[in-house]
Image: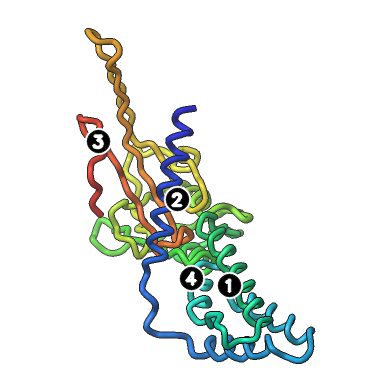
Amino acid sequence: MKTRFWIAMLLCVLVSTAGRAAEEKPAPTNANPKLDRQISQLVGQLNGDKAAERDAAEKQLLELAGSTTAQSDRFLELLPKENDQMPLSVRDRLSRIRQQVEDRSAKAATGSSTITLKADKMPLAEVFAAIEKQTGNKLIDNREDQDGKEGKSGNVTIDLKAEPFWSAIDQILDQAKLGVYSYGGEEALSIVARNEGDGSRHGQAVYQGPFRLEVLDVQAQRGRRQPGQNTLKLQLEVAWSRDCGGGNLATSRRPKSDDGHWKPTHR
């Protein structure tokens, strides 16, 4: 029960951190002129003479907002702010649109991408490309053959239907006998050859939205002279994907030191 409580607390902290990271991202320097024109045109139609025209414009604006956090952020940056110069009905519609897009973006930030893939001896390169296309999460094959050349061989046969991102990744890596390099950077998930003796990834972790949590090491110590002074040390690996709003894939390992404090993590 206590373990579940601390995992829940950790997830709250991670979601909060990811949200702040998303809020602090600087505005992109290269705006989308086509999207800007579309939004401006539809905002003008929000003041149309016919109710059907106004409703249609509002619906199209919501569709332009997209379904991912990145798309929603881009849309909200271009959507005009409500002001006193606008008719009241236009301001109300803009406020309603902004609220719906923000709510949708918040749900996406704490949710998880899903993967649907039916593969029959599909090359790993094609599998990784399909995952990136569906989720926006980039996977890089960093394996090397013994002669130093990049090793990209391997096929996968799997049938996934709306499988959460990390669960799907673990199943694919287990089948291909591959692993993840935890310090490969934040721009992509670095795929490497699995070490001999490594167990399965799938089923060993907890999946919660865009997060993957796995306990890598457990050390329990009980005092003989002072029975009340018992300690439990965990090495916890936390991985998160683009879904949480940070815009990158990342993995963090947090070991505890002898004094019970978290050691700083370097990536």
Q: Check disc 2 and report the residue beneath it.
A: 173
Q: Earlier in the sequence, mark 1 or mark 4?
A: 4
At 44% from the left and 42% from the top, the residue drawn is 201
Which of the 4 image quadrants contains residue 157?
Answer: bottom right
CA separation in Å, label 3 and label 1: 42 Å
User: Which quarter of the rendered picture does the C terminus lie within?
Assistant: bottom left
Single out the mark in the foreground, 1 or 2: 1
Q: Nearer the viewer, residue 12 or 187?
A: 12
Secondary structure beneath dot 1 equals helix
Single out the mark in the foreground, 3 or 2: 3
Q: Nearer the viewer, residue 79 or 35?
A: 79
CA separation in Å, label 1 and label 4: 15 Å
Q: Earlier in the sequence, mark 4 or mark 3?
A: 4
Q: How is the image coloured?
A: rainbow
Q: Is residue 7 above or below residue 242?
A: above
Q: Is residue 134 above or below residue 57?
A: above
Secondary structure beneath dot 4 equals helix
Numbered label attached to residue 70: 4
Percent coordinates x, y for residue 101 in the rendering = 58, 69
Q: Are marks 3 and 2 in contact (CB under 8 Å)?
A: no
Percent coordinates x, y for residue 220 in the rendering = 31, 22
Question: What kind of residue is marked 3?
Answer: His
